[in-house]
Each structure stands twice: as C-alpha cells, then as structure tokens.
Image (cartoon, grey):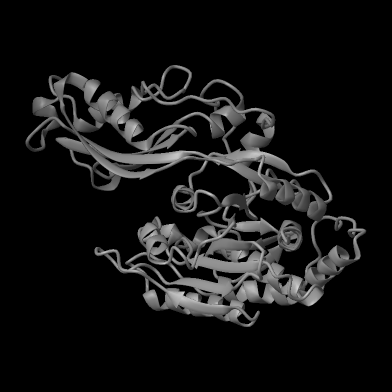
Amino acid sequence: MSEPTSRPQPPTPSDPTEAAIVAAVDEALPATLDALAGLVAIPGIAWASFDPEHLQHSARTVAGLFADLGLEARVLSVDDGDRTGGPAVVATRPAADGQPTVLLYAHHDVQPPGDPDAWQSDPFTLVGRDGRLYGRGAADDKGGVMVHAAALGALARAVGETGVGVTVFVEGEEEAGSPTFRAFLDAHRDLLRADVIVVADAGNWKAGVPALTTSLRGLVDATVTVRVLDHGVHSGMFGGPVLDAVTLLSRLIATLHDENGDVAVEGLVQGTAQGLDYDEDAFRADASMLPGTRLAGTGSLTTRLWNRPALSVIGLDAPAVDVASNTITPAARAKLSLRLAPGQDPDAAMAALERHLTGHTPFGAQVQFAAGERGQAFDADVSSTASALALRSLSDAWGTPAVTAGMGGSIPFVADLTEVYPDAQILLTGVIDPDTRAHGANESMDRADFRNAIVAEALLLHRLRR
C-alpha cells in the first residue's frame, strides 16, 4: 500500500496549525492504509444467507479503531420486534462547554462480492493499482470509516483536545436496507444527538474534484404480476389467440416510458438541476455504455440524474431460457425501482405507479401490484455554516474548488436523521467517484482522493470549534 498517489498533493495550508494537521494525515497514511486493508479483509455482509460472525468481527474491529483513539466505543444493536439489527458501533467523546457535537456516520457492512471471476484481484484483499485502491467495501463504506478514524487521529496528534464533541456511528446493516435504523435512532436518540452530522457515504463529482452532495433522490419499489391463464398450455395448440404473460408484461412495462425515454407515470414531481452539467462523452464512459446506444430522457444530464424520476426493471421472473418448453407462460412478474425527484412524497409516488400499472392492463390480463420499500428524498441547506466550512475544507484539501452536486442515488436513512434531529446541519461527503463501481466487481476509490478526504474532514472538525 505504499504506492504513490495518482496526482500531486495540494499546497500546504499557510496556517501553522492546519499545516500540522495535514502533516499528521500524511505521516499516518501508511498505517491508515494498513487499517483499511484489515477492514476490507473481513467479509461482513448483513444478509441472512451469510455468516453473521464476520459481521460481528467487523464491528469489533471498528470499535477497536476508535477505542484506540481514546473514544468510548461500544457495539450495539436493537430489536424492532421483527428482527435483531446488525451490530453498530457507537464511539463517543463529550463536548466541552459551549462547543458543538459532531456525529460522524459510516457503515462497516458491505455488499456480497458477486462472481469472483469478474474481479481482477481478490475482493477481500485491498490492492493498489494505477492510483486506485481495489476491494469490496474499499469505497463503500469502509473507506468512509477510515476517513473518520484517520481524521480524528490526525487532529489529536496535531492539535490535541479541541473541545468539539464527537460521536461516531458506524452502522452494520446499511447494505441490507437499514431495516432497524429508525428503531436504533429511537432507542439511542440522546446518545446520537448532534449539532452537525457528517454522512461519509456519498461521493465526489469526479476523481480530483471534491463535492458536497446537496440532494438525493427518493425511492419506491414494487412488484407487478401479470397473469393470463390458470396454468401453462401448449404454445402450438393455443398460441395466436392467447398471448403469453411475458409478452403482456413486456407491453405493460413499455408504457412506463414515453418515446423519449422519460418516465410516463403521471403525477410525479419533475425538477431541474442548476449549475453543473455532465459531459456526455464522460457520462457514456462512466456508465460503460455500448457504442451507438442512445441516451434516454430530455433535459440536461444532471437534471435527468438528480431532479427527475427514473424507473428501472431490476428483477424479472419468467421461464429461464435453458429450461424453456413450448408452453404459453401463464404468469410473469417484474420488480420495479422508481427513483424520485426531491420534493416527491413517496406514498404519492407509490400510488401513482399503482394507478399507472393497473390502468394500462394489456389485453384484459390480471395485473397485481405489491408495494415495496419507500425512501424519502433529501435537499440540503447549502446556506448553513457547516456547509460553508465543509466546502472550504474540501477545496483546501484538494487544492481545487469544491462543487455542490446532487446524487441520483438514494440514502433513505438521511430522511430519518432530518426528522429525528431537525436542527442538525447534515453534510454528505465520501470517497466514491464515477469509476468506483460500488456494489459491482472491482470496486475501488481514488487513492489521492482518499487522502484528501481525510485532510478535509480533519480541517472541518478543527474549524467547527467555536
């Protein structure tokens, strides 16, 4: 992990204290990378089909990182009546009189690795290659865990006690949908209360350009089933007058977008992004689009990504090709994921999706709609003091102006944080960039950006002192 960073380091701050903070980050960077490698090596996956001991091991290891920094660290979980939540780490250091408390959020659980043959290196071994760090969870979100730990460590070595209170909250079930997150907040509301909340689970505009994420899309998902027969029948004897369920489901799915590729479900909020736009060639490369494939939708790319709904088929139940027979399929179903523009009520969006699907029944087939998860969108207050300090700290750490950017993805628990702590200033940061491939094979982060993210957070924590 001693590979050099992919870009020259930004200039050292002129302020002696802040220069000492940067030096402390750089001096400890080899040890920080070793600690990150140790976390990546633990396959902590919060899904019932995986060994829960790995997740417990991951939580204990994270707790040890913050205990070594002098924080009081505990591994906690809650039972919401339906399940026991994944092990979370809460580490605290109280604020001095008159000083703010900062909550630093990340998650230590990761996605399953998927097909091992799709990885260029072992998914649970941190590998440096071409200026990037590869491994499952390296960016999402063990990189975020280590940004918090390394920033606190550098600040302690360079400055000592600042008086700013710190609460570290490292969740253990985010990749499983955070099923007990709200119950955890309710159970530990006072323990987690803070003036500023830093969520290190977002990302940057691109490698080398830092961003403060200021909006997230919401999310609803649902399953739609199309049924045309009581049972399968011979495709030669009955085919023609009877269309199979897969064809009818396909016709129904096709109504969800108009001829331009915009979502055609009526009643959904439509917004417009301001400022930044995405270069089309860069977007095509980042999305790994095949040559000749047309982009869908209208408006700027950032508008389509951040402020408009997006609807995808993420699952399909139909006969597999390898076992298909000459039978008219009686029923087929699809799982739909609908991303929502900021300002959209998820319940209203779910109702609109159901109205559309049941109102476009093809050839009189039976259509059944099963509502799934709901997640709120998020719009940040970019005029807050914490936002201004974060943008300044990001700019100084990277040596280039930070941007404010939306994110097309959803982090539903952020809405829980805003509801439980309405007076807290929430900042979304992280080490993800367009080439990270989070959740996919060969997940990675830019090594220089990782270092700069640590510097930025350490500077922010220093500057939040009153």
**In which image quadrant can residue 300 be found?**
top right
Q: Residue furthest top?
A: 259
Residue 193 appears at what percent x and percent y?
51, 61
Looking at the image, which is closer to me, 374 or 5? 374
Q: For residue 18, say whether it is visible.
A: yes
Residue 287 appears at what percent x and percent y?
58, 40
Residue 373 appears at what percent x and percent y?
33, 46
User: Is residue 171 positioned above or below 373 on the image?
Assistant: below
Looking at the image, which is closer to me, 16 or 289? 16
Which quarter of the image is occupied by the N terminus? bottom right
Residue 276 appears at what percent x and percent y?
69, 32
Looking at the image, which is closer to me, 459 or 205? 459
Q: Residue furthest front?
A: 97
Q: For residue 108, say whether it is visible.
A: no
**In which image quadrant can residue 226 be found?**
top left
Which quarter of the image is occupied by the C terminus? bottom right
Residue drawn at 75 percent across, 70 percent down: 155
Looking at the image, which is closer to me, 285 or 397? 397
Residue drawn at 63 percent across, 54 percent down: 430
User: Is residue 366 positioned above or below 443 on the image?
Assistant: above
Tally of numbered tags = 0
Query: Position of 308 compared to 152: left or right?
Result: left
Residue drawn at 52 percent across, 57 percent down: 118
